[in-house]
Amino acid sequence: MTNNKFPSISIVGATGAVGKVCLDILAERNYPFEKIKLFASKRSIGKRISYKGNDLIVNEANKSSFDGSDVVFISADSQVSLDLAPAAVNSGALVIDDGSAFRMKENVPLVVPEVNEEDINSHEGIISIPNCTTTPLVMALSHLRKISNIKRIQASTYQAVSGSGSLAVSELKNQTENILNNEKISKSVYPHQIAFSLIPQVDDFLEDGYTKEEHKMVNETRKIMHDNNLNISVTCVRVPIFYCHSESVSVDFEDDIDIQEIVNLFSNADGIKLINDGKNENYPTPSMVEGKDDIFIGRIRKDLGSSRGVNFWLVSDNLRKGAALNAVQIMESAIKLGKIPNFVG
Amino acid sequence: MTNNKFPSISIVGATGAVGKVCLDILAERNYPFEKIKLFASKRSIGKRISYKGNDLIVNEANKSSFDGSDVVFISADSQVSLDLAPAAVNSGALVIDDGSAFRMKENVPLVVPEVNEEDINSHEGIISIPNCTTTPLVMALSHLRKISNIKRIQASTYQAVSGSGSLAVSELKNQTENILNNEKISKSVYPHQIAFSLIPQVDDFLEDGYTKEEHKMVNETRKIMHDNNLNISVTCVRVPIFYCHSESVSVDFEDDIDIQEIVNLFSNADGIKLINDGKNENYPTPSMVEGKDDIFIGRIRKDLGSSRGVNFWLVSDNLRKGAALNAVQIMESAIKLGKIPNFVG
């Protein structure tokens, strides 16, 4: 690729957990540093971030920051997305937003390229990426529905603290050290102790007893699968690990299923890696999936109570396929489809 | 209670994780030290364990160790139970066994006193206590089935390492310190890293892709509920916490359900404590349940996909109600029912 094959990128939230991984992924693709501009909140202004031997300097974003950018990645608070995305779109950029602000808007495609790349064609300036628990789930479901109609999905998650940002990573580390040293712990990110404990709450609670995170998984899955009646219920739980979200998933089908057919489908699926050999104690774990691009599936087995049900275990790096990698892949799909407004390539 | 109201107890596995908690529970009940004999494996012989100001000395058990004991608690490898339980029964004792060796035997009651205390009446010398994930689940289910027939149960567990014994507690602690210090970890209890990771395997795998632990939960629940056709499927996962097992549970009923009715039932149930106020971020977590006798339930809500389904979150101390406390309660029920062969009280 010559240099002018690379669209100019702005990254808003460059110093955050997802922003950092986004830069790693661009570096793996040999993205030229002069095509990248970094933005973050006030306290990071002037910070230098080393990128392939060069220093990129962090600026504060304002509404005229994006002139000349073809693509603007935003991974920050929803309010930042709401403030900056319209300006970026006005300046002609394609916004790829990691937050929940636009995901359910009708004119905003919500995209996992392996599942619904064609939805990119209908964007009006903003494309959202799904919640980090939704992305791996829909990657699995999009294959499973080839087997038979899906009647019902139930999932329980095991989510890493990095999904709450860098401060949560520090909170788990500090609390862990405190407990090992018999010291008092302090809390700021989470309402309860996370080290050596669990928190069955991700995001705020709604009136129906579910959390926003649980509703995100449900609603986003329906949107991406283009099936507003998809029967799905989830429980989201924060676990004391740094990276990778795991999910225990049960899917019921309209017809009897053949487990080997499911194994074969997943084996040949883009972006999915199978580790499905329980007898030899081989299955995906967060510590082995950390830093990997693929989502990992194992423990595929028939439900003990239903010949039409399958249970499986899913692990993916929440900062890579769950966030930054999916965002970069959307950009690459948009290039391929000619859907970056100001960029011919 | 006068001293002769206390049956004489032998504890086999006294130096293990469950054995230690068993002594704590007996101390809370002011059990007299002269009624307690301790046994463990060879390497612990002669060890002194302080109990209410007295030193109890650990011996190695053999087939004549239990003469004079009214009750023998066994919490050790299944082979130890198989070797020693028949001798204890022959010497006239009631064996209360924490392992899986006898649980599914037809002439061995499997008991959670709050659920099926009356099954104690039919014992022939051995009573088993259920697996530490089964006990809290059946405590919840025994109330739920009053609402409507149960059609299906699905559960995903979040199990503490103490369920694998004291060595696993050390392994989590050591690996955690290693990782925080950027050192290499070592593994002996678990086949994969447990610190800051998850292991979707508890006990060995069987041919059908499930683990023994998962089959235990299924089969034991059916036995305790006296319903061999109960439709239940589970996924068991080890998480990097020391104490307390948690479960994300979904139950489908034959009829539409009223969540408030379920809340009311649990509120008035023996041995169950509700923390069910998500709006104020109140729900049970392992760090708050550790050391507690009750099982804790929260996050009770209607399934998003079924008006006949309920989802909830369950936490219990795996060493107390999940093991030692349940064993002591079985003894107390057996005293009440007059079912300790050599003990009149």
Image: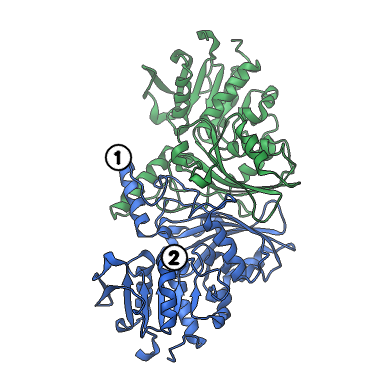
Chain colours: A green, B blue
Spatial CA distance of label 1 from label 2 is: 35 Å
Give the image quarter of residue A221.
Answer: top right
Work out whether B315 lies above or below B40.
above
Point 45% across, 32% down: residue = A291
The part of the image, by quadrant, that contains residue A209 is bottom right
Q: Residue at x 46, y 19 (%)?
A: A37
Q: Can residue A18 be seen in this view?
A: yes
Q: Which mark is residue B183?
A: 1
Classify 10 Å Cα crowding around label 1: few (below 14), some (14-19), many (20 and above): few
Position of A208 with respect to A281 (left or right) is: right
Which secondary structure, mark 2? helix
Query: Local crowd at mark 2 within 10 Å, few (<14), some, or many (≥20)?
Result: some
**Residue B78's disc number:** 2
Q: In which quarter of the image is the N terminus of chain B?
A: bottom left
Q: Which chain carries label 2?
A: B
Could you say where residue B48 lies in the image, as x and y percent from the top left? Answer: 24, 71
Q: In which quarter of the image is residue A149?
A: top right
Amino acid type at mark 2: Ser
> Disc 1 is attached to a residue of which chain?
B
Along the line of sight, which residue is nearer the eye, A337 or B172? B172
* Amino acid type, residue under disc 1 in the picture: Glu
